[in-house]
Image (tube, grey):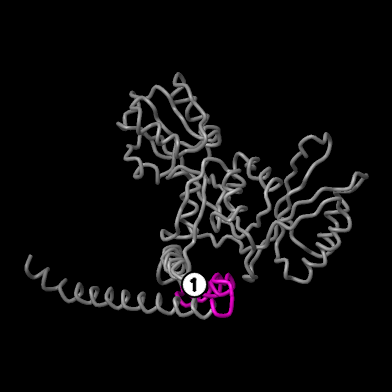
Amino acid sequence: MSDKKNILAPIRERIDSIDNNILSLLKERLECAHEIGRLKSTKNKAKWDPLRERQIYDRLTRDNNKTFPEESLLSIFHEIITTCRLSQQSTTVAYLGPEATFSHLAAVQYFGHNADYHPIQTIEDVFYEVEKGRVNYGIVPIENSIEGSVTSTLDSFIKCKVQICGEESLAITHNLINHSGNMDDIKLIVSHSQPLAQCREWLKKNLPSVPCQSVFSTGIAAQMAAEDQTVAAIASSLAIKTYQLQVVVKGIEDYRGNSTRFILIGKESPAKSGRDKTSLLLSLLDKPGALNDTLAILSRRNINLTRIESRPVKGESGKYLFFIDLLGHMDDGVIIEACERLRESCSYFEWLGSYPIDKGLK
């Protein structure tokens, strides 16, 4: 045993020395970020530079040459970069609460752990918090790979004047959790309507006689499970630790590969990053071929349309608004030209924002 310790001792000393060097360099990097923040403040420049961050991630990926596990490398530097950026200026973020919802998890994934997070009761209220300037940003779900669009998010864009500043995709794993970890104790299952829908076959097969109840969020569901030993929640992994609950069954979703796309909303969109997406809100003229004419404006300019979603205009039967996502930034010449044509050909046109495409950090 002593021989083994003697062999390990110099290696451990080297690791300690490396860790100390890393800590010293992190402190130095933070001071550099503070200096950049001070310089930007004197010149009224935005604290967030998406192009610069994209260049850092690309350089790190290239120089790493797949030696260090790439996903872990990007995750580590994502936390470092966001911590340094947020240290330049306090950032407040609203999300659909309470704590430990998937929206909360997506917000932490996007901003790291050092932002000032504010749980809000409804998606619409997250929009109002941003519009009124009470928080810097809000993060809301916009579509799920299985259940489709989140209509309350789309409808809130019609009511509020905010802009999309970013996006984040979150792999969704649903856990059945309760106070004891025992399935026999479950008399009621609660969750948001989307998780209940995404787990309906599993629930039907394994707990056919237990009623389900829809609540505003998975966080509220976890709170209910923490307060009542007969209640189980379908919730995120963050909820297990936050509310000190036990896992009954992990991964009860009916389909693997389930993910939700979240969008970051704020008062203004960021500058170009080099890999961007633009979102628009349109209403078409009442004439034959109007949708085809609109899409032709994009196709003639080789603009890649990644998503189109329609929503009825409330109180106006037969009229629809179209939410469109396309690749490119509003500062790109071809996007500017296409949007000018769309303004002319549509009865309503609104630019919802241009923002960096999700980096895929998980």
Up/down of 56 relative to 276, above or below: below
From the top left corner, tell me how far across and down residue 221 is, in percent: 44, 34
- Mark 1, Cα crowd under 10 Å, few <14 / some 14-19 / many 20+, is some
Q: Residue at x 85, y 57 (%)?
A: 296
Residue at label 1? 61
Give the quadrant of residue 49. Answer: bottom right
- Is 13 on the left or on the right of 197, as rendered? left
Give the quadrant of residue 155. Answer: top right
Determine the residue located farthest toward the top in the rendered image.
209
SS assignment at label 1? helix
Q: Amino acid at mark 1?
A: Thr
Up/down of 12 relative to 283, above or below: below
Q: Residue at x 42, y 68 (%)?
A: 80
Query: Which of 68 and 348 lies nearest the eye of the viewer?
Result: 348
Up/down of 112 relative to 314, above or below: below
Magenta residue span: 41-65
Up/down of 23 relative to 149, above or below: below
Determine the residue located farthest toward the left in the rendered image.
2
Determine the residue located farthest toward the right in the rendered image.
288
Q: Is residue 50 magenta?
A: yes
Q: Residue at x 48, y 74 (%)?
A: 60
Q: Is residue 248 magenta?
A: no
Quarter of the picture holding the N terminus: bottom left
From the top left corner, tell me how far across and down residue 242 is, in percent: 36, 44
From the top left corner, tell me how far across and down residue 105 is, in percent: 46, 50
- Is 354 on the left or on the right of 282, as rendered? left
From the top left corner, tell me how far across and down residue 59 is, in percent: 51, 76
Query: Which of 94 and 129 lies nearest the eye of the viewer?
Result: 129
Q: Residue at x 90, y 44 (%)?
A: 286
